Protein backbone atom coordinates (compact mmCIF):
# COMPACT_ATOMS: atom_id res chain seq x y z
CA UNK A 1 0.00 0.00 0.00
CA UNK A 2 1.41 3.37 -1.05
CA UNK A 3 1.34 6.53 1.04
CA UNK A 4 -0.06 9.91 -0.17
CA UNK A 5 3.56 11.05 -0.53
CA UNK A 6 3.80 9.24 -3.89
CA UNK A 7 0.63 10.88 -5.16
CA UNK A 8 1.96 14.35 -4.39
CA UNK A 9 5.37 13.53 -5.90
CA UNK A 10 3.82 12.28 -9.14
CA UNK A 11 1.58 15.33 -9.30
CA UNK A 12 4.60 17.58 -8.90
CA UNK A 13 6.48 15.64 -11.62
CA UNK A 14 3.73 16.09 -14.22
CA UNK A 15 3.19 19.75 -13.35
CA UNK A 16 6.87 20.52 -13.89
CA UNK A 17 6.88 18.42 -17.07
CA UNK A 18 3.93 20.36 -18.51
CA UNK A 19 5.50 23.67 -17.54
CA UNK A 20 8.76 22.64 -19.29
CA UNK A 21 6.86 21.65 -22.44
CA UNK A 22 4.77 24.79 -22.36
CA UNK A 23 7.63 27.22 -21.80
CA UNK A 24 10.08 25.07 -23.83
CA UNK A 25 12.73 25.64 -21.16
CA UNK A 26 15.44 23.10 -20.35
CA UNK A 27 15.52 24.40 -16.72
CA UNK A 28 12.24 22.66 -15.97
CA UNK A 29 13.50 19.43 -17.51
CA UNK A 30 16.65 19.50 -15.34
CA UNK A 31 14.40 19.92 -12.28
CA UNK A 32 12.71 16.62 -13.18
CA UNK A 33 15.91 14.62 -12.67
CA UNK A 34 15.93 14.51 -8.82
CA UNK A 35 12.18 13.96 -8.77
CA UNK A 36 12.57 11.02 -11.16
CA UNK A 37 15.26 9.49 -8.95
CA UNK A 38 12.98 9.93 -5.93
CA UNK A 39 10.09 8.23 -7.71
CA UNK A 40 12.30 5.30 -8.71
CA UNK A 41 13.50 4.90 -5.09
CA UNK A 42 9.88 4.93 -3.94
CA UNK A 43 9.10 1.85 -6.02
CA UNK A 44 12.41 0.05 -5.39
CA UNK A 45 12.28 0.25 -1.58
CA UNK A 46 9.18 -1.62 -0.50
CA UNK A 47 8.21 -2.91 2.94
CA UNK A 48 7.45 -6.60 3.57
CA UNK A 49 4.30 -7.70 1.76
CA UNK A 50 3.12 -9.38 4.95
CA UNK A 51 4.09 -8.40 8.48
CA UNK A 52 4.82 -11.58 10.40
CA UNK A 53 5.09 -10.82 14.10
CA UNK A 54 4.52 -12.68 17.34
CA UNK A 55 2.86 -10.35 19.85
CA UNK A 56 2.28 -11.42 23.45
CA UNK A 57 0.49 -9.26 26.00
CA UNK A 58 1.40 -9.63 29.68
CA UNK A 59 -0.97 -8.68 32.51
CA UNK A 60 -0.61 -9.68 36.16
CA UNK A 61 -4.36 -10.22 36.45
CA UNK A 62 -7.62 -9.40 34.70
CA UNK A 63 -9.66 -7.97 37.61
CA UNK A 64 -8.96 -4.49 38.89
CA UNK A 65 -10.63 -1.90 41.09
CA UNK A 66 -11.76 1.52 39.94
CA UNK A 67 -8.90 3.99 40.07
CA UNK A 68 -6.24 1.26 40.13
CA UNK A 69 -3.16 1.73 37.95
CA UNK A 70 -2.27 -1.22 35.72
CA UNK A 71 1.00 -1.90 33.91
CA UNK A 72 0.52 -3.41 30.45
CA UNK A 73 3.45 -5.10 28.72
CA UNK A 74 3.76 -6.16 25.06
CA UNK A 75 6.51 -8.40 23.64
CA UNK A 76 6.94 -8.21 19.86
CA UNK A 77 9.18 -10.57 17.87
CA UNK A 78 9.83 -10.60 14.13
CA UNK A 79 9.19 -14.16 12.95
CA UNK A 80 9.22 -13.25 9.25
CA UNK A 81 11.98 -13.71 6.64
CA UNK A 82 12.58 -10.00 6.08
CA UNK A 83 13.85 -7.22 8.34
CA UNK A 84 11.47 -4.35 9.05
CA UNK A 85 13.12 -0.92 8.69
CA UNK A 86 10.34 1.01 10.39
CA UNK A 87 7.64 -0.64 12.49
CA UNK A 88 4.79 1.33 14.05
CA UNK A 89 2.76 -0.37 16.81
CA UNK A 90 -0.48 0.93 18.32
CA UNK A 91 -2.20 -0.96 21.14
CA UNK A 92 -5.89 -0.02 21.20
CA UNK A 93 -7.27 1.14 24.56
CA UNK A 94 -10.95 1.31 25.54
CA UNK A 95 -12.45 4.70 26.33
CA UNK A 96 -12.98 3.65 29.96
CA UNK A 97 -9.25 3.66 30.77
CA UNK A 98 -6.77 6.53 30.55
CA UNK A 99 -3.08 6.51 29.81
CA UNK A 100 -1.02 7.51 32.84
CA UNK A 101 2.57 6.67 32.02
CA UNK A 102 4.61 6.03 28.87
CA UNK A 103 2.69 5.40 25.62
CA UNK A 104 0.71 2.71 23.84
CA UNK A 105 2.28 3.87 20.55
CA UNK A 106 5.76 2.66 19.58
CA UNK A 107 7.98 3.20 16.51
CA UNK A 108 10.94 0.85 16.19
CA UNK A 109 12.81 -1.45 13.76
CA UNK A 110 13.21 -5.22 13.92
CA UNK A 111 15.73 -7.52 12.28
CA UNK A 112 14.85 -11.12 11.51
CA UNK A 113 14.23 -12.95 14.80
CA UNK A 114 14.75 -9.78 16.87
CA UNK A 115 12.43 -9.10 19.83
CA UNK A 116 11.46 -5.87 21.55
CA UNK A 117 9.24 -5.02 24.51
CA UNK A 118 7.45 -1.91 25.69
CA UNK A 119 5.35 -1.07 28.73
CA UNK A 120 2.81 1.56 29.61
CA UNK A 121 0.54 2.27 32.57
CA UNK A 122 -3.20 2.91 32.42
CA UNK A 123 -5.74 3.94 35.04
CA UNK A 124 -9.00 2.00 35.42
CA UNK A 125 -11.49 4.87 35.39
CA UNK A 126 -14.89 3.23 35.10
CA UNK A 127 -16.44 -0.02 36.25
CA UNK A 128 -17.38 -2.57 33.61
CA UNK A 129 -16.09 -5.35 31.38
CA UNK A 130 -13.74 -3.99 28.75
CA UNK A 131 -11.14 -5.16 26.22
CA UNK A 132 -7.50 -4.23 25.65
CA UNK A 133 -6.54 -4.52 22.00
CA UNK A 134 -6.40 -5.44 19.22
CA UNK A 135 -2.84 -4.41 18.35
CA UNK A 136 -2.41 -2.63 15.02
CA UNK A 137 1.01 -2.66 13.31
CA UNK A 138 2.26 -0.84 10.25
CA UNK A 139 5.58 -1.64 8.54
CA UNK A 140 6.96 1.22 6.42
CA UNK A 141 10.02 1.54 4.15
CA UNK A 142 12.78 3.95 5.15
CA UNK A 143 11.49 6.79 2.95
CA UNK A 144 7.88 6.27 4.05
CA UNK A 145 6.46 5.79 0.56
CA UNK A 146 4.74 2.45 1.12
CA UNK A 147 3.52 0.43 4.06
CA UNK A 148 1.89 -2.84 5.09
CA UNK A 149 -0.82 -3.01 7.77
CA UNK A 150 -1.81 -5.89 10.02
CA UNK A 151 -4.20 -6.19 12.96
CA UNK A 152 -3.56 -8.86 15.62
CA UNK A 153 -6.88 -9.86 17.15
CA UNK A 154 -5.20 -12.55 19.27
CA UNK A 155 -3.84 -9.84 21.57
CA UNK A 156 -7.36 -8.84 22.66
CA UNK A 157 -7.57 -9.28 26.44
CA UNK A 158 -10.79 -9.16 28.45
CA UNK A 159 -10.53 -7.47 31.82
CA UNK A 160 -12.97 -6.41 34.51
CA UNK A 161 -13.03 -3.20 36.54
CA UNK A 162 -15.01 -3.71 39.73
CA UNK A 163 -16.50 -0.77 41.66
CA UNK A 164 -14.59 0.07 44.82
CA UNK A 165 -16.33 1.05 48.04
CA UNK A 166 -15.59 2.39 51.50
CA UNK A 167 -15.68 0.40 54.70
CA UNK A 168 -18.09 1.84 57.23
CA UNK A 169 -17.07 1.71 60.88
CA UNK A 170 -20.29 2.81 62.60
CA UNK A 171 -23.88 2.47 61.51
CA UNK A 172 -26.42 5.06 62.75
CA UNK A 173 -29.49 3.03 61.74
CA UNK A 174 -31.49 0.96 64.17
CA UNK A 175 -33.96 -1.75 63.30
CA UNK A 176 -37.26 -2.18 65.07
CA UNK A 177 -37.13 -5.96 64.73
CA UNK A 178 -33.68 -7.31 65.70
CA UNK A 179 -32.76 -10.95 66.12
CA UNK A 180 -30.88 -12.47 69.05
CA UNK A 181 -27.49 -13.20 67.47
CA UNK A 182 -24.66 -10.67 67.47
CA UNK A 183 -24.80 -7.92 64.87
CA UNK A 184 -24.64 -4.17 64.23
CA UNK A 185 -27.93 -3.09 65.85
CA UNK A 186 -28.11 -1.84 69.44
CA UNK A 187 -30.65 -3.13 71.93
CA UNK A 188 -30.67 -2.06 75.59
CA UNK A 189 -30.47 -5.20 77.73
CA UNK A 190 -28.81 -6.33 80.92
CA UNK A 191 -26.34 -9.14 81.30
CA UNK A 192 -22.67 -9.98 81.31
CA UNK A 193 -20.44 -9.31 78.34
CA UNK A 194 -22.46 -6.34 77.00
CA UNK A 195 -21.06 -3.06 75.65
CA UNK A 196 -21.23 0.11 77.76
CA UNK A 197 -23.78 2.65 76.43
CA UNK A 198 -24.17 5.33 79.13
CA UNK A 199 -25.63 6.00 82.59
CA UNK A 200 -29.09 6.69 83.99
CA UNK A 201 -30.65 7.13 87.40
CA UNK A 202 -30.69 4.06 89.61
CA UNK A 203 -33.96 2.15 90.13
CA UNK A 204 -34.77 -0.51 92.68
CA UNK A 205 -34.70 -3.25 90.03
CA UNK A 206 -31.09 -2.51 89.07
CA UNK A 207 -28.17 -4.58 90.29
CA UNK A 208 -25.91 -2.98 92.88
CA UNK A 209 -22.92 -4.18 90.89
CA UNK A 210 -23.85 -1.82 88.04
CA UNK A 211 -23.88 1.36 90.09
CA UNK A 212 -21.64 4.04 88.59
CA UNK A 213 -19.90 5.46 91.68
CA UNK A 214 -18.18 8.29 89.80
CA UNK A 215 -21.47 9.69 88.51
CA UNK A 216 -23.09 9.08 91.90
CA UNK A 217 -20.40 11.11 93.65
CA UNK A 218 -20.60 13.89 91.07
CA UNK A 219 -24.39 14.40 91.09
CA UNK A 220 -25.20 13.32 94.66
CA UNK A 221 -27.64 10.56 93.70
CA UNK A 222 -27.36 6.98 92.53
CA UNK A 223 -26.62 6.30 88.84
CA UNK A 224 -26.37 2.91 87.15
CA UNK A 225 -24.53 1.84 84.01
CA UNK A 226 -26.53 1.03 80.86
CA UNK A 227 -25.25 -1.60 78.43
CA UNK A 228 -26.21 -2.45 74.87
CA UNK A 229 -26.16 -5.73 73.01
CA UNK A 230 -25.44 -5.93 69.29
CA UNK A 231 -28.17 -7.76 67.40
CA UNK A 232 -28.69 -8.75 63.80
CA UNK A 233 -31.58 -8.16 61.44
CA UNK A 234 -32.59 -8.73 57.86
CA UNK A 235 -31.59 -5.91 55.51
CA UNK A 236 -33.11 -5.15 52.11
CA UNK A 237 -31.37 -2.65 49.82
CA UNK A 238 -33.44 -1.12 47.02
CA UNK A 239 -31.34 0.57 44.31
CA UNK A 240 -32.92 3.02 41.90
CA UNK A 241 -31.10 2.60 38.56
CA UNK A 242 -33.63 4.27 36.27
CA UNK A 243 -32.76 6.73 33.54
CA UNK A 244 -32.55 9.91 35.64
CA UNK A 245 -29.93 8.41 38.00
CA UNK A 246 -27.23 8.09 35.32
CA UNK A 247 -25.01 10.89 36.65
CA UNK A 248 -25.03 9.55 40.21
CA UNK A 249 -25.40 5.79 39.70
CA UNK A 250 -21.76 5.05 40.52
CA UNK A 251 -22.06 6.71 43.94
CA UNK A 252 -25.26 4.75 44.62
CA UNK A 253 -23.58 1.46 43.69
CA UNK A 254 -20.66 2.19 46.02
CA UNK A 255 -23.16 2.95 48.81
CA UNK A 256 -24.90 -0.40 48.21
CA UNK A 257 -21.61 -2.30 48.43
CA UNK A 258 -20.45 -0.37 51.54
CA UNK A 259 -23.70 -1.06 53.39
CA UNK A 260 -23.72 -4.71 52.30
CA UNK A 261 -20.14 -5.26 53.44
CA UNK A 262 -20.85 -3.74 56.85
CA UNK A 263 -23.99 -5.77 57.56
CA UNK A 264 -22.64 -9.04 56.19
CA UNK A 265 -19.64 -8.63 58.47
CA UNK A 266 -22.03 -9.07 61.41
CA UNK A 267 -23.81 -12.09 59.88
CA UNK A 268 -26.92 -10.14 58.92
CA UNK A 269 -28.97 -11.44 56.03
CA UNK A 270 -28.78 -8.95 53.17
CA UNK A 271 -30.89 -8.83 50.02
CA UNK A 272 -30.90 -6.50 47.02
CA UNK A 273 -33.40 -5.26 44.47
CA UNK A 274 -32.23 -3.21 41.49
CA UNK A 275 -34.99 -1.21 39.82
CA UNK A 276 -34.49 -0.51 36.11
CA UNK A 277 -36.89 -1.24 33.27
CA UNK A 278 -36.81 -4.70 34.83
CA UNK A 279 -36.30 -5.79 38.45
CA UNK A 280 -33.19 -7.70 39.45
CA UNK A 281 -33.46 -9.58 42.77
CA UNK A 282 -31.00 -11.19 45.16
CA UNK A 283 -32.65 -13.09 47.99
CA UNK A 284 -31.63 -12.64 51.62
CA UNK A 285 -28.39 -14.35 52.59
CA UNK A 286 -25.72 -13.88 55.25
CA UNK A 287 -23.00 -15.63 53.22
CA UNK A 288 -19.87 -13.65 52.41
CA UNK A 289 -20.42 -14.76 48.81
CA UNK A 290 -23.41 -12.44 48.79
CA UNK A 291 -21.12 -9.43 48.46
CA UNK A 292 -19.35 -11.10 45.53
CA UNK A 293 -22.71 -11.71 43.83
CA UNK A 294 -23.72 -8.08 44.34
CA UNK A 295 -20.42 -6.86 42.91
CA UNK A 296 -20.56 -9.12 39.85
CA UNK A 297 -24.05 -7.91 39.04
CA UNK A 298 -23.45 -4.21 39.72
CA UNK A 299 -20.42 -4.17 37.40
CA UNK A 300 -22.80 -4.20 34.43
CA UNK A 301 -25.66 -2.07 35.79
CA UNK A 302 -26.45 0.99 33.67
CA UNK A 303 -29.28 3.47 34.08
CA UNK A 304 -32.17 2.48 31.79
CA UNK A 305 -35.40 4.10 30.72
CA UNK A 306 -38.65 2.67 32.06
CA UNK A 307 -41.11 1.73 29.33
CA UNK A 308 -44.14 0.82 31.45
CA UNK A 309 -44.48 2.03 35.03
CA UNK A 310 -47.52 -0.18 35.70
CA UNK A 311 -45.62 -3.33 34.77
CA UNK A 312 -42.64 -2.18 36.84
CA UNK A 313 -44.89 -1.52 39.86
CA UNK A 314 -46.33 -5.04 39.69
CA UNK A 315 -42.88 -6.59 39.38
CA UNK A 316 -41.62 -4.69 42.41
CA UNK A 317 -44.63 -5.68 44.52
CA UNK A 318 -44.37 -9.33 43.56
CA UNK A 319 -40.69 -9.49 44.43
CA UNK A 320 -41.14 -7.72 47.76
CA UNK A 321 -44.17 -9.68 48.90
CA UNK A 322 -42.89 -13.13 47.97
CA UNK A 323 -39.21 -12.99 48.88
CA UNK A 324 -38.63 -10.44 51.64
CA UNK A 325 -40.21 -10.30 55.14
CA UNK A 326 -42.31 -7.23 55.90
CA UNK A 327 -40.34 -6.42 59.06
CA UNK A 328 -36.83 -6.39 57.54
CA UNK A 329 -34.96 -3.11 57.53
CA UNK A 330 -35.37 -1.54 54.07
CA UNK A 331 -32.95 1.10 52.77
CA UNK A 332 -34.05 2.74 49.52
CA UNK A 333 -31.16 4.41 47.68
CA UNK A 334 -32.41 6.96 45.18
CA UNK A 335 -31.84 10.65 44.30
CA UNK A 336 -35.64 11.11 44.33
CA UNK A 337 -35.59 13.36 41.28
CA UNK A 338 -38.17 11.73 39.00
CA UNK A 339 -41.78 12.03 40.09
CA UNK A 340 -43.12 8.81 38.54
CA UNK A 341 -40.33 6.67 40.01
CA UNK A 342 -40.72 8.38 43.38
CA UNK A 343 -44.35 7.23 43.53
CA UNK A 344 -43.19 3.63 43.14
CA UNK A 345 -40.51 4.04 45.81
CA UNK A 346 -42.93 5.73 48.25
CA UNK A 347 -45.30 2.80 47.71
CA UNK A 348 -42.45 0.43 48.60
CA UNK A 349 -41.58 2.38 51.76
CA UNK A 350 -45.19 2.57 52.93
CA UNK A 351 -45.66 -1.18 52.56
CA UNK A 352 -42.58 -1.94 54.69
CA UNK A 353 -42.72 -1.67 58.47
CA UNK A 354 -39.18 -0.39 58.86
CA UNK A 355 -37.81 1.66 55.96
CA UNK A 356 -36.09 4.93 55.09
CA UNK A 357 -34.43 6.70 52.14
CA UNK A 358 -30.73 7.30 51.59
CA UNK A 359 -30.78 10.19 49.11
CA UNK A 360 -27.53 11.10 47.34
CA UNK A 361 -27.66 14.67 46.04
CA UNK A 362 -27.81 14.63 42.26
CA UNK A 363 -27.55 18.43 42.34
CA UNK A 364 -24.10 18.46 43.90
CA UNK A 365 -23.04 15.53 41.70
CA UNK A 366 -23.91 17.25 38.42
CA UNK A 367 -22.72 20.67 39.59
CA UNK A 368 -19.18 19.29 39.97
CA UNK A 369 -18.93 18.88 36.18
CA UNK A 370 -20.02 22.44 35.35
CA UNK A 371 -16.91 24.42 34.40
CA UNK A 372 -18.48 27.89 34.33
CA UNK A 373 -20.36 28.11 37.63
CA UNK A 374 -21.14 31.80 37.16
CA UNK A 375 -22.84 31.47 33.79
CA UNK A 376 -26.44 32.71 33.98
CA UNK A 377 -27.89 29.79 32.02
CA UNK A 378 -26.08 27.24 34.20
CA UNK A 379 -27.27 28.98 37.35
CA UNK A 380 -30.89 28.95 36.16
CA UNK A 381 -30.72 25.23 35.34
CA UNK A 382 -29.11 24.60 38.73
CA UNK A 383 -31.80 26.54 40.59
CA UNK A 384 -34.55 24.78 38.65
CA UNK A 385 -33.07 21.39 39.58
CA UNK A 386 -32.84 22.45 43.23
CA UNK A 387 -36.50 23.50 43.30
CA UNK A 388 -37.74 20.32 41.61
CA UNK A 389 -35.67 18.16 43.94
CA UNK A 390 -36.94 19.97 47.01
CA UNK A 391 -40.53 19.50 45.86
CA UNK A 392 -39.98 15.76 45.47
CA UNK A 393 -38.33 15.48 48.88
CA UNK A 394 -41.24 17.36 50.44
CA UNK A 395 -43.69 14.82 48.99
CA UNK A 396 -41.77 11.99 50.63
CA UNK A 397 -41.55 13.78 53.99
CA UNK A 398 -45.30 14.48 53.91
CA UNK A 399 -45.85 10.72 53.74
CA UNK A 400 -44.12 10.44 57.14
CA UNK A 401 -41.06 8.70 55.71
CA UNK A 402 -37.48 9.22 56.89
CA UNK A 403 -34.89 10.75 54.53
CA UNK A 404 -31.13 10.94 54.98
CA UNK A 405 -29.68 13.41 52.45
CA UNK A 406 -26.13 12.65 51.39
CA UNK A 407 -23.88 15.15 49.64
CA UNK A 408 -21.77 12.86 47.44
CA UNK A 409 -18.78 15.19 47.74
CA UNK A 410 -18.53 13.86 51.32
CA UNK A 411 -17.28 10.24 51.62
CA UNK A 412 -20.00 7.84 52.73
CA UNK A 413 -18.01 6.71 55.78
CA UNK A 414 -17.70 10.34 56.96
CA UNK A 415 -21.40 10.91 56.33
CA UNK A 416 -22.35 7.83 58.35
CA UNK A 417 -20.08 8.90 61.19
CA UNK A 418 -21.81 12.29 61.32
CA UNK A 419 -25.20 10.59 61.44
CA UNK A 420 -23.90 8.39 64.27
CA UNK A 421 -22.92 11.45 66.28
CA UNK A 422 -26.29 13.13 65.66
CA UNK A 423 -28.13 9.96 66.69
CA UNK A 424 -26.08 9.77 69.88
CA UNK A 425 -26.75 13.37 70.83
CA UNK A 426 -30.48 13.28 70.11
CA UNK A 427 -31.09 9.77 71.40
CA UNK A 428 -32.11 6.76 69.37
CA UNK A 429 -35.54 6.66 67.84
Image (spheres, grey):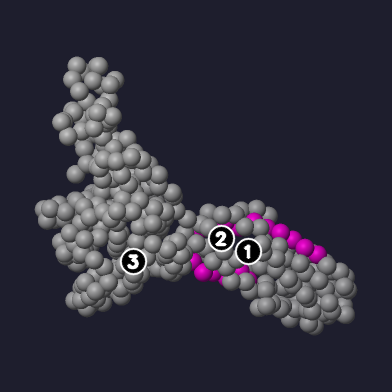
Residue occupying image coordinates x 24% and y 66%: 325
Mark 3: secondary structure = strand
Mark 1: secondary structure = loop
The residue lying toward the viewer, choosing from 411 and 259, is 259
The residue lying toward the viewer, choosing from 233 and 241, is 233
Residue occupying image coordinates x 18% and y 20%: 221
Image position, residue 196 (x, y; %): 32, 35
Write down the residue under mark 1. 61
Write down the residue under mark 3. 284
- Magenta residues (range): 116-133
Q: CA distance from mark 2 to mark 3?
A: 27 Å
Write down the residue under mark 2. 64
Mark 2: secondary structure = strand
Local packing at callout 1 (Cα closer than 10 Å; few below 14, some 14-19, many 20+) is few
Q: CA distance from mark 2 to mark 1?
A: 8 Å
Q: Say if mark 2 contacts mark 1, CB within 8 Å.
A: yes
Residue occupying image coordinates x 24% and y 74%: 322
Amino acid sequence: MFSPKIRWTLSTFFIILLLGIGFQSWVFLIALVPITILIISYFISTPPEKVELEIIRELEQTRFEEGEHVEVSLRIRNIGTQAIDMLEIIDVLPLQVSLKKSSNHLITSLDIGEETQFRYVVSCDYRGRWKLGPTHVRARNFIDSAYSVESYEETVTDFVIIPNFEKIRDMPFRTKYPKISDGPFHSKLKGEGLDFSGVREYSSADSLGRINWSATAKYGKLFTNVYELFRTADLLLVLDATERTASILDEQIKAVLSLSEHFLKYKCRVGLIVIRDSVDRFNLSSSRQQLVKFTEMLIDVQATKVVSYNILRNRIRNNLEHYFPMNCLTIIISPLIQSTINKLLIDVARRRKNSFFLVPSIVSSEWRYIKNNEDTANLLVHQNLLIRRQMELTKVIQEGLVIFEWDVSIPLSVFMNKLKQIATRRGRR
